[in-house]
Amino acid sequence: MQKYDFTIPTLGSSTIKSPISLSKKIGDFMANYVDDDLYIIYNIETKPNAVAETYKKEMLLEIAGPREKIFFQPENTHAAVVTCGGLCPGLNDVIRAIVMSLWYHYGVKKITGIKFGYKGLIPDFKIPTIKLNPEHVENIHQQGGTILGSSRGYGDNTEKIVDTLQNKNINILFTIGGDGTQKGALDIANEVKKRKLNIAVVGIPKTIDNDLSFIQRSFGFETAVGKALDAVTSAHTEAHDAVNGIGLVKVMGRQSGFIAAQAALASNDVNFCLVPEVPFELKGKNGLLAQLESRLKKRHHAVVLTAEGAGQNLLEKSQKTDKSGNPKLADIGLLLKSRITQYFNQKNFSINLKYIDPGYIIRSAPANPNDSVYCARLGTNAVHAAMAGKTQTLIGLLHNRFVHIPINIAVAKKNKINPDGPLWRSVIEITGQPQLMLNQTKNT
Amino acid sequence: MQKYDFTIPTLGSSTIKSPISLSKKIGDFMANYVDDDLYIIYNIETKPNAVAETYKKEMLLEIAGPREKIFFQPENTHAAVVTCGGLCPGLNDVIRAIVMSLWYHYGVKKITGIKFGYKGLIPDFKIPTIKLNPEHVENIHQQGGTILGSSRGYGDNTEKIVDTLQNKNINILFTIGGDGTQKGALDIANEVKKRKLNIAVVGIPKTIDNDLSFIQRSFGFETAVGKALDAVTSAHTEAHDAVNGIGLVKVMGRQSGFIAAQAALASNDVNFCLVPEVPFELKGKNGLLAQLESRLKKRHHAVVLTAEGAGQNLLEKSQKTDKSGNPKLADIGLLLKSRITQYFNQKNFSINLKYIDPGYIIRSAPANPNDSVYCARLGTNAVHAAMAGKTQTLIGLLHNRFVHIPINIAVAKKNKINPDGPLWRSVIEITGQPQLMLNQTKNT
Amino acid sequence: MQKYDFTIPTLGSSTIKSPISLSKKIGDFMANYVDDDLYIIYNIETKPNAVAETYKKEMLLEIAGPREKIFFQPENTHAAVVTCGGLCPGLNDVIRAIVMSLWYHYGVKKITGIKFGYKGLIPDFKIPTIKLNPEHVENIHQQGGTILGSSRGYGDNTEKIVDTLQNKNINILFTIGGDGTQKGALDIANEVKKRKLNIAVVGIPKTIDNDLSFIQRSFGFETAVGKALDAVTSAHTEAHDAVNGIGLVKVMGRQSGFIAAQAALASNDVNFCLVPEVPFELKGKNGLLAQLESRLKKRHHAVVLTAEGAGQNLLEKSQKTDKSGNPKLADIGLLLKSRITQYFNQKNFSINLKYIDPGYIIRSAPANPNDSVYCARLGTNAVHAAMAGKTQTLIGLLHNRFVHIPINIAVAKKNKINPDGPLWRSVIEITGQPQLMLNQTKNT
Amino acid sequence: MQKYDFTIPTLGSSTIKSPISLSKKIGDFMANYVDDDLYIIYNIETKPNAVAETYKKEMLLEIAGPREKIFFQPENTHAAVVTCGGLCPGLNDVIRAIVMSLWYHYGVKKITGIKFGYKGLIPDFKIPTIKLNPEHVENIHQQGGTILGSSRGYGDNTEKIVDTLQNKNINILFTIGGDGTQKGALDIANEVKKRKLNIAVVGIPKTIDNDLSFIQRSFGFETAVGKALDAVTSAHTEAHDAVNGIGLVKVMGRQSGFIAAQAALASNDVNFCLVPEVPFELKGKNGLLAQLESRLKKRHHAVVLTAEGAGQNLLEKSQKTDKSGNPKLADIGLLLKSRITQYFNQKNFSINLKYIDPGYIIRSAPANPNDSVYCARLGTNAVHAAMAGKTQTLIGLLHNRFVHIPINIAVAKKNKINPDGPLWRSVIEITGQPQLMLNQTKNT
């Protein structure tokens, strides 16, 4: 088991009395501050009688929440919020919670919304910022997307971004985004440090693919699964009601197939669930095509659910034969559609294939109630962390506790389905699909 | 921190090769059996450098899942399923998963559905049983309730129930129900043991209140919160659109206010969230009535969300004046409705109170996708446990792992909101309600 | 067949060129003005070869829509909107459409929202008005209720209301409300006429009960049925899953049982649908109680759906014995609950009755897409009517056309289910309930 | 105004007493038989004082419903149901209603489900039929699609189909399908007539495009609009949250743009609604591309909603340059996507276009409550018509009455949006799109 240093960087010592009035007593029925000394263990799996280990502070995850002493003086604090990357259910919930907590809990009244991702911090793009206040955000959680807009990438502009933060006297930057966004946040925080500025950078990890490590589940993931399920149900209905109907659905998941796996479990109607973590072949007697044929002969309909990143082995091959040398990944959904059609055509086996790509419908949905609560608590805890002077930190949920996670650790590796673990086993159990659709057994 | 003995009772050693074909290798992309030696730590909160402790087996929670060796011979196994107590979203999902897993994974073809709770096992009630098979249960997860029906209680009939199990040659009994049901399951298992029978009793904990200990969340809880939220939204709309409108909603939660707390977080519109764990008073300047008046004067509308078990201190008093000596709890919703109305009438302060009691609508809903997945995995893991000869055991989720929990430990205490913990703090933060609506500070 | 004079009153002749640019040609693919000469026949049922009748103008219903010439000069027009009575899905959609149409189609930029019903027009209540513009109303249709708030009644204040209209120089008053509201609108319009003012009063009929005459269906009705159906489904689940379960649901419908009838048709699970239009008895061999017993003996569960105004014959009797002489109707839902319980108790027949009253949940819902479209078109047509100087007029839908209906005719009688017509026959067909639960045949 | 002969063909005179017990009296609170003499007027629009017209029977539409005398003896009747063409919300509701009405109202116990469309009646395909009964269909309305499966076309097999009907002694064939299906039904009925058989052929018109004439709206249409609206909302969110975002949605509507038009009205977010009935150009200053550019420059985001049959003028042109001579229509959605992208690329105007094609998600949805009721009543009335010996007849809704429509009239022309009528005007009003996106005014 690898060890990590989970120490959370801070801007300095917190000496200001928090304006939030909480209790420090146990048993007085009143909500409490979070003790700075409260941690959880990261690795909870063990063998009985394994050698005992005394947990050093840096190996433990710090519990998130309001501290009695904070770093920033609320009346002089200027906070900014930015959302980056693709849409994801719950973005507006997080924005709302940040604004509400800053305003009502801490009395921070200067809150700036950065529009269209990091681009909104780069003067070249001339994108105006907006002022955020409770009235502005009151009902935004009922809508999908982000009121701040979003964009991808920011190029080599870290210095310009920090210039902007300095020019605007911004003390706290909340970065809501995925892997790339948080790497950017780290760059910004490092530049901030180099310039010896007192600017806290706190991230709220957003990844609809659920591929961020050290985080139990990402916000919006459950909502995404619910929406993906709707598409699977449609595909099943179409497949079931046609002679040799095949319903083919592609969902998000570039490197991690969590949405596909979870939607397969929720649906009970998926016969083949394809994810990036488990390779498969199309041809040969163990390949998907022969397995699909066998299923059709038995039941006359089938549902195939694929993550967009599944089958990269297949796509790489096809790219080799592509003369244009286009490095952009081919579309596994369209590839499967074409190969399946071709396969059955050649056999004179009449099929009815219906292909559904619900991507935008999934990611633009408003958060379901459970994600809404999760987002509200992530946003609030991000405010608590930032006001306490934590920086270079994400707010995450692990073992059902809200914790602080250093950005550099969180972005170091992707969260993926473990084919040897319980989730993938459940998928195999519930789909009834072959354990491995390869003609020769592979090892990692 | 109290210590528990989590040792799982078994009927004997498992010597039969499981008919499920799984891998034992890591890294071959194939789903694996669960190693009997795999455990998780129960208590994950710690202080840095706390004295190390070597975990004995009995202090650890056993990971659930399919074992390589099982106890029961599938072709000779007769399994039965019973659902007890009030309705809860997901019951049919659990039944479905149990039947599907027995049938397809293990080849157990003799599956009996016991109708209307434990009553269906007591000959006096003359309730016929039904045969369950995949065709029968294929689509039942789309409907709320339980296809087996349910009932409460079973009186002093443990011996009769075990007689029935013996007469029907039932080898496995799956008990889907709450606290009382699982206590009954324990009685049954003890009687089984006394008679030296080979009958496994495996429970799937059902509690819409989320009040079962050692379990991260109970199935159906998220769905219930979603439905409760709908009622809160209605109450808010009614309150907002009337002059001095008050929306009052009562939700389930006899001893634990989780539904109310979570719905308050999901809604953002609740101004007063009342739960059994935190006492409050009606009268006096800190009391709910004065606080409500103050809110109305400021904002002209308010939403009060109460768990059914909140305010027992108030109801006890009113019972003392009740001559009938009826031990049945008075209805906190109606009490609040009447006291609030009376209070403002006396002040000649015109209000518009709308009272919503969505109880049956909440509990009869079909499971949402996330609960559906959870139920499917609970049911499948219950089958794995039973086939491996585990007994007197619940399937639970803890620290995001499916684990085995001895029934005797699980029923020993209720899961409650900790007023000193992060959930209640989030409620206080998001509702903005007073920390304590008592005129004198209390201690537990 | 009774004859009506459908002539629409106007403030004067329309001489101003409409700022809306539409076509007058047929076949140019461009949307057209409505010809002032376009009407539809009210009574469309006939016997073959019935004597022909030449339709006089006053016997025909005028088609709604934009006229080429209008009465009010947009730049000098001040419009006001008021919502009255109980909540109903779609109120915000209507408000939104009125504001959008005034602003964008006609360029009317002075639009006032009257808060909390007619009270907002009576100075004594000191309720401030609000300014309405497109930004304000852009997303309101996504929320239930009315952003203007509502209240019931306005007492004997017609003159004060017209004073207010005069003082504020209001030229158009849009009244969104039911029977009582539109009678009030008529009073206001008559007072306006007496004072020889140029104020148009145009109503949009709101009645969740669907009890307004000359209107095919009222806005929000379909949404209400959908929500009522949810409650019926819950009741069915509860009833089905208990031993001798009875699900009892009460829905809106004071004098007309349309919601109950339509929800019964949508559900397929209702066994007894009770409406105000068809009397029934509880006792005797044809009475509801005996019929319910017979159903339970056969099927062991039953669903009873009642409109709140059903069974007035039963309630009248109980009122006679009531000494307080309280004219307020007793609650048929609670009466049924108590009588059914009592009946089966006396027979020692154990039942499980679950009573659901989803009233507030139904009426506070946002409009479904079809109601949303309907509201948008009602609101837009109301603006067209008012700008053209029509007054004392409602916008309605009849034979699938948007038409103008004089208020005085519309409020003269209630729309009710005709027990001899196709809707009630469908209810009888689909519930399978007895044609008549009376012990002696009655005639009207 | 064209005149039609609406006379309904019958198999002979109805002489058998209906087993349904209904009343013939008015005012006895009991549901009534439908009088054979009850009709409605087709053309209800008129000019005042237009010359009177005495309606001959054949110019009137016969009211649907149960007759006192029927043609078929229930105990000897064998009914069959077939569903053809693409999926549509409500198919299962119609099947359910037919089975329930035959079984419970008339006592017809021999009901055969024909699988996979007309193919199931052609022996060559060797598709087995299924028996239908109430238990089988009880809950099917909760699922999308059709339990009977469906397929398109049936080739030149009318004689074989009638052979099958004869061989199976089928007396009534219910054909649920669109234009083509009902033309097929007419062929079958004519062959039946030629052979002097007593087989009634009664159709329930299914067209998700709402393009069947003489029918107020087709079943499933409202549900389809609701689902289309979801896609439009996603498109709007995606467009709104990106820099110069364009949301492009394609919905069903080969020759009639009703879904697009109604979804545009429901959404309020559509800026350009394209339908087959109104031609448009891409290029030139009035063309869509320039209009879109102008919108983006003003508001920075736009939503384009197109019916699949819109812009045929554009596609025809592109086909002319296509050498393969493929007569299959090009995809307007993909064409727009490519032309829009190309246009802005050439201008170096950076856009973010997201294309959504929700077709299968729309058509496979289960019916919403209002469609459910509609389907139930259509199915029941189809049974009444068939049992009374009507044939070559559709059940439709016109002027809010259920009526009989001769198939030959219904299939003679398509129902289309009238650009001069109120629906298209509402679209223009609510989208704010240009009246005509042509560079030269056109005439039909």
Image (cartoon, coloured by chain):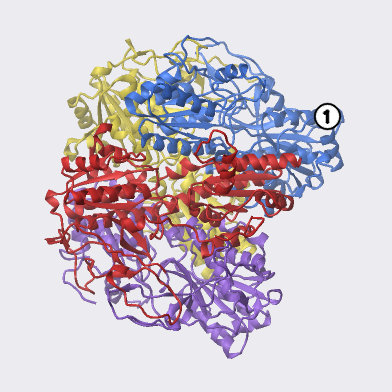
Chain colours: A red, B purple, C yellow, D blue
Q: Tell me residue D236's x, y (percent).
A: 41, 35
Q: Which corner quadrant of the image does residue A159 belong to? A: top left
Q: Tell me residue B428's x, y (percent).
A: 25, 60
Q: Tell me residue C316's x, y (percent).
A: 43, 53
Q: Is residue C245 left or right of residue C175?
A: right
Which residue occupies the foreground of this view, C375 or D388? C375
Which residue occupies the foreground of this view, B212 or D193? B212
- Residue located at (56% from left, 41% from top): A356
Q: Is residue A290 above or below residue C195?
A: below
- Residue located at (58% from left, 74% from top): B67
Q: Is residue D219 above or below residue B217?
A: above
> Dividing the image into 4 quarters, which one contains the N terminus of chain D?
top right
Q: Tell me residue C422's x, y (percent).
A: 59, 38
- Determine which residue is flagged by label 1: D191
- Residue located at (70% from left, 27% from top): D407
> Dividing the image into 4 quarters, which one contains the C terminus of chain D?
top right
Chain under label 1?
D
